[in-house]
Image (cartoon, rainbow, N blue to C red):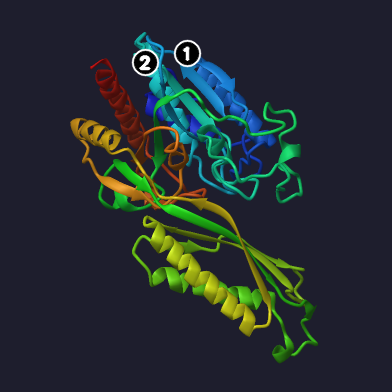
Amino acid sequence: MAERGTTGGARAVERCRTLGRAPYSDMEGGLFRAWLSSSFVAAQKAVAGWMADAGMDVATDPATNLIGRYEGTQDGPALMIGSHLDSVRDGGFYDGPLGIMLGIEAVAALKAQDRRLPFPIEIIAFGDEEGSRFPAAMLTSRAVAGTLEDYSLEMTDAEGVTLRQALQGFPADTALDAARHAPALAYLEAHIEQGPVLEAEGLALGVVTGIAAQLRYRLTVSGKAGHAGTTSMSLRNDALASAAEIILLVERTARAGAEDLVATVGFIDAKPGAANIIPGRVDMTLDVRALDPSVRDGAASVILDGAQTIAQRRDVRLTAEQIHDLPASPCDAGLADTLATVLEQQGHSPRRLASGAGHDAMVMEALCPTAMVFIRCRGGVSHNPQEHVEIQDAEAALQAILGFLDKLEVTHDA
């Protein structure tokens, strides 16, 4: 752990690194923290201790989110600061946890000054943002925002465990019923950029203007398995070769589109998976994003229509199931202006940029005004063990959060 006297930014970074190791990871030699796993439970326990040390009352809501509350001098809507605790497989240390740790450090700084703001502060560690275990993302923030409608307790993970089974022993063992009915003042999220813009421009921080719209599909290509040595090429119904052509179509379509349009096949599973058998089935995902929803939807339509054409020509069957649809989410203009002012006053360029990656903030926008600050990450690398944040950048983000709190206090009292 960080030594006494270490800055809050350094402590936040060190705690993220601590959470990247056993018992807080489900894989050896790397980080994978799936929602509701044993490593997730261990990480929640550690974070709950850090929240308590910072002077917060700690609880877990019915959607398994961990919440630390620091009371204000007045009753009223709380400012929520948060991010997610789960991670992708073989991921980096900072995607998600850094925002939580910086929120804890902001409260710790207030406690050290024996200071309370006119409004309560709640630090929230969302359980599932990545879709780290089940085939849907942001389940727990959607539960809080009251927008979780399209989910089933019978959905299964890769091992065939249902969500209902995984929730046994948690407060939410029957439903993710955590809709927040009390008003919230705002939601603030600090997050690594997960892109190269800030580093390319020599900037530590940036103000997020909004988050791109996302579509995600589960695609299944069904062909005919056969002997690799005895089935001639002209008689094959190769599901994997068909999938490969579809993947190239995905890439071509995105490259030919708007600058912010991206499309990805991030998961593929060919069956039966033997060297001497022609693949008879391929399951894969399709993820399409753009800041303009019409651009996103148009590209998805081109891809799916083209994929069906490929399937028909190759005499295989293609099914496409939409599993994720998140609209573009603009950050609150007034809060973005406040963050930009804080950055400028603290000696930073008030750089504004949009996010191509999804964040819990895009879900929380349905509940209250949202704001995000991006933190430079080395090489723009994320979802990768090489993910790296400089301590001085984390400290700059912490100071920006504290400056943001100061501005909200003045506005609240005005």
Marks 2 and 1 sit apart, C-alpha to C-alpha, by: 9 Å
Q: Residues within 10 Å of mark 1 (few under 14, many from 20)?
A: some
Q: Compared to 274, does 146 lie above or below? A: above
At label 1, which amino acid type do we have? Answer: Gly
Q: What residue sits right under mark 1 in the picture?
A: 55
Count of numbered badges drawn on the protein: 2
What mark, if any, has residue 115 been given in the picture? none
176 with respect to 227 (left or right): left
394 with respect to 244 (left or right): left
| Quarter residue 372 falls in | top left
Residue depicted at 80% across the width and 87% down the height:
230
State which tag comes first along the sequence, 2 or 1: 1
Q: What residue sits right under mark 2 in the picture?
A: 110
Give x and y (percent) for residue 369: 37, 34
Q: Compared to 293, does 205 lie above or below? A: above
Residue 358 in sight = yes
Residue depicted at 53% across the width and 76% down the height:
306
| Quarter residue 65 falls in | top right
- Quarter of the image with the C terminus in it: top left
| Quarter residue 86 falls in | top right
Give x and y (percent) for residue 100: 47, 30
Contact (CB < 8 A) between labels 2 and 1? yes
65 with respect to 332 (left or right): right
Secondary structure beneath disc 1? loop
Residue depicted at 44% across the width and 38% down the height:
366
Residue 23 in sight = no
At label 2, which amino acid type do we have? Answer: Leu
Q: Residues within 10 Å of mark 2 (few under 14, many from 20)?
A: some
Residue depicted at 29% across the width and 33% down the height:
335
Give x and y (percent) for residue 51: 51, 20
Give x and y (percent) for residue 197: 31, 52
